[in-house]
Image (cartoon, helix red, strand yellow):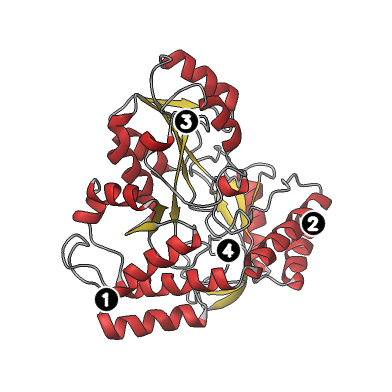
Amino acid sequence: MPVMQSPPGAETIIDGRPYLYFAGTGYLALQGHPEVVQAACDAVRQYGISSATTRAGFGNVPPMLEVERRAAEFFAAEEAFYYVSGYVGNQIFSTALGERFDGVLVDELSHYSVWEAARLSGRPVIAFRHRDPADLAAKLTAHLKAADRPLVLSDGIFPVLGSIAPVAEYQRVLASYPGAALAIDDAHAVAVLGRYGRGTFEHAGLLTEGGNRDPDAAGGSPDGPALLFCGTLSKAVGGFGGIIPGTRQFMGWLKSHSHYFEAASPPPVPAAAATARALQLIMAEPGMRTRLWENAAAVKDGLRRLGLPTDDTPVPIVCLSIGDKTNMQRIQRELIERGIVIAYTSGYSGVGAEGALRLAVFSTHTKAMIEQLLDAFRQLL
């Protein structure tokens, strides 16, 4: 199993060798940013590794509260809820809100965390075809009554495919169900999509500020279903943990109904300090996100010129199916021999039996690095 021996970035050391790195999820390459690392070092010296008790007890330390303050500012929300892992954000929603809904509908290619959350809701779970609003409408008609309240769950950006959920179309489908909600796992969209990096809803023009609010207050209005989202801070943000921003009232209610506030261990203190500093950098330097979009466009345009189908979204993920499993593993292996790392993924949510090649683009990739990647593909196809 390969061992990473440096922070993930445009150039990363793996098993003692430097590589051009087009893998993983560190899209803004903040995991190794000097100021982010220094914030973690300073915090561990002052506060130790962990507060060793829950946040409902004496477990709050200044870096954790700073993450919530910075995240609220980033999302233009009143408050935010910071918890131990982005993976559990969907579970926080489903277990706290599940009793308010009559059925949960899930995009069939959603991440494992989304499916696990749906099953924990205690409500009937129905799959609909990937990114298919018409099938969502059909499943709603087939399985729910007109007076029922549906909860729809989906990734915002699908982690291997790189596709974006058509949330505006889902919103229109749900408009005829008063009290409905659409909840998005924005793990790969926070700090990536939208003018301010606020994620999938902002990218779709549905939500610009304020974050989450109580579905009973937001749903069933002329504006359509309640829009909910959770985010991950360990990917583009470069820190650790998960975040849900929103109104002060809803954040208080969510914390009081979540075991991840009253019973789970909080995020490690140095990780919280690093996350707070990373959020500050992202807000101060929006050019990082612009460079990310430009690099994603350059990689996708170059691959299209080689005859490989790619989308034209700003998502920094490219999923390629080139022949069968053996051929894709050959391409990955020969790229590694040339000093370039990409991922071959099989058996992951959203990936077929043959698997797929997954490329991740970073804001710190240079034009020369991108050209080296494209030239290598040109020779290997």
**Badge 1 vs badge 2, beta-carbon distance below 8 Å:** no
Marker disc for residue 243: none
Q: Nearer the viewer, mark 1 or mark 3?
A: 3
Image coords of residue 299 (percent x, y): 73, 58
What residue sits 54% from the left and 27% below the top?
Answer: 129
Q: Which residue is mark 3?
A: 221
Image coords of residue 94 (percent x, y): 33, 38
**Label 1 vs label 3: CA separation?**
45 Å
Which of the marked residues, 2 or 3, is nearer the chain's N terminus? 3
Residue 171 appears in the figure? yes
What residue sits 55% from the left and 32% below the top?
Answer: 171
Which of the marked residues, 4 or 2, is nearer the chain's N terminus? 4
Image coords of residue 130 (percent x, y): 56, 32
Which of the marked residues, 4 or 3, is nearer the chain's N terminus? 4
Q: Which residue is mark 4?
A: 27
Which of the marked residues, 1 or 2, is nearer the chain's N terminus? 1
Q: Give, as a three-letter code, the residue at label 2.
A: Gly
Where 204 falls versus 245 (above or below)? Answer: above
Query: Neighbour class for label 2 at 10 Å: few (<14), some, many (≥20)?
Result: many
Q: Which residue is mark 1?
A: 49
Q: Nearer the viewer, mark 2 or mark 3?
A: 3
- Hey, which quadrant is residue 149 in on the image? top left
**Badge 4 vs badge 3, beta-carbon distance below 8 Å:** no
Q: Quadrant of the N terminus?
A: bottom left
Query: Neighbour class for label 3 at 10 Å: few (<14), some, many (≥20)?
Result: some
**Label 4 vs label 3: CA separation?**
36 Å
* 186 or 245, nearer to the observer: 245
Q: Nearer the viewer, mark 4 or mark 3?
A: 3
Q: Which residue is mark 2?
A: 302
* 148 or 334, nearer to the observer: 148
**Label 4 vs label 2: CA separation?**
19 Å
